[in-house]
Image: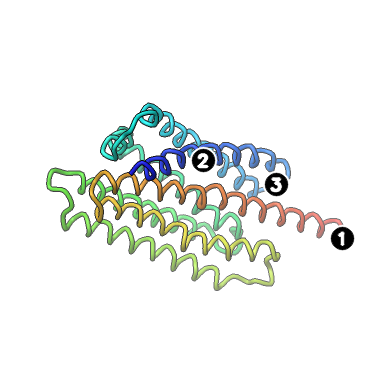
Amino acid sequence: MTTLFNLTYYSFLVCGVAAAVAVLYFMTQVPHLEGRLRYLAFLNILICGVSSVLHLYFFNSLHTLASASPDLAEMAAAIGQLPLTVRYGYWLVTTAMLILMFPLLIGPEHVGVRFAVQLVLIDAGMILTGYLGEHSAQGGDGVTLATFAWFALSGMLWLAMTASILRVLRRLPSDRLIPAQRDALVYMFFFFLIGWAIFPAGFFYAIVFETGIGVVLRELTVNIGDIVNKVIWGILVVYAAREIVNASRRERTH
């Protein structure tokens, strides 16, 4: 149990520092981007900035327990000090900004505004139903049929969003995209397919395992997901955006 505590405790520090370093990197990339692509850097700065603050807050909150020999119930209680509404509000805002990077990187001329609105609405539904599922599990009756129903609905919305992205990517005129743009979109899709599946898995830990273990495992899983889905994802997106700008500049000089 001590090993699990240490892994989760230091994962908050790693996530917080990684997100802070990513913010500095994205700030250096803003002058190299143009037009709508500059918004990608700004979105990543906001996402990683909020992520860094939240993870370092948790790390600091658990600091007093780290010097003792805490049990998982104490750690779960410390993690639970942040209200569920705040946690899901953070996920709602950051996932919406992350998912908007697909249409921004593809270009409105290829997908239109409707695709972006559709993604944001499905994402909001996925987060809301996830919240309702976890909220029902924290009630006096514990895990109920309603808990599984809400989580199942959240999972179906994730599948619907996956299908929407895949459908748009398959219809894209690949000859009008530069290689770095095509590669980035493919990598982003697989990041989404695999990386975002980490979050539902984390939620189910709280259902499958005993409460204390489930909460701590969920935080460790979500922290790993945050590094993949925020820091690494952001670096990939901004790199692709910079390559698009460089290609556009080369075209203008010819």
User: Which type of secondary structure does the marked residue at label 3 adopt?
Assistant: loop
Q: Residue at x 24, y 53 (%)?
A: 207
State the SS at label 2. helix
Disc 3 crowd rating (10 Å Cα; few below 14, some 14-19, many 20+) is: many
Upstream in the sequence, badge 2 or badge 3? 2
Estimate the spatial distance between the alpha carbons at disc 2 and disc 1, rounded to whole Å.
Answer: 45 Å
Residue 14, which numbered label? 2
- The earlier-in-sequence mark between 2 and 1 is 2
Q: Measuring 71% from the left and 57% from the top, which residue is drawn there?
A: 244
Q: Is residue 167 left or right of residue 79?
A: right
Amino acid type, callout 3:
Leu
Label 1 packing within 10 angstroms: few (<14), some (14-19), many (20+)? few
- For discs 1 and 3, the disc positioned in front in the rendered view: 3
Viewer-closest of 6 and 217: 6
Which x, y percent locates residue 187? 58, 63
Question: If you read the primary sequence from the N terminus, does the residue marked by circle 1 or circle 3 appear first?
Answer: 3
Using the image as rendered, state which of residue 160 and residue 207 is in the foreground. Answer: 207
Q: Is residue 70 above or below residue 3?
A: above
Of 50 and 13, which appears nearest the observer? Answer: 13
Q: Which label lies toward us, 2 or 1?
A: 2
Quickly name the residue at label 3: 33
Q: Amino acid at mark 2?
A: Val
In percent of width and height, residue 240 lies at 66, 56
Give the spatial CA distance, label 2 vs label 3. 28 Å
229 relative position to 213: left or right: right
**If the image is split into quadrants, where does the N terminus sit?**
top left
The residue tagged 1 is: 254
Amino acid tagged 1: His
Q: Which tag is nearer the camera, tag 2 or tag 3?
A: 2
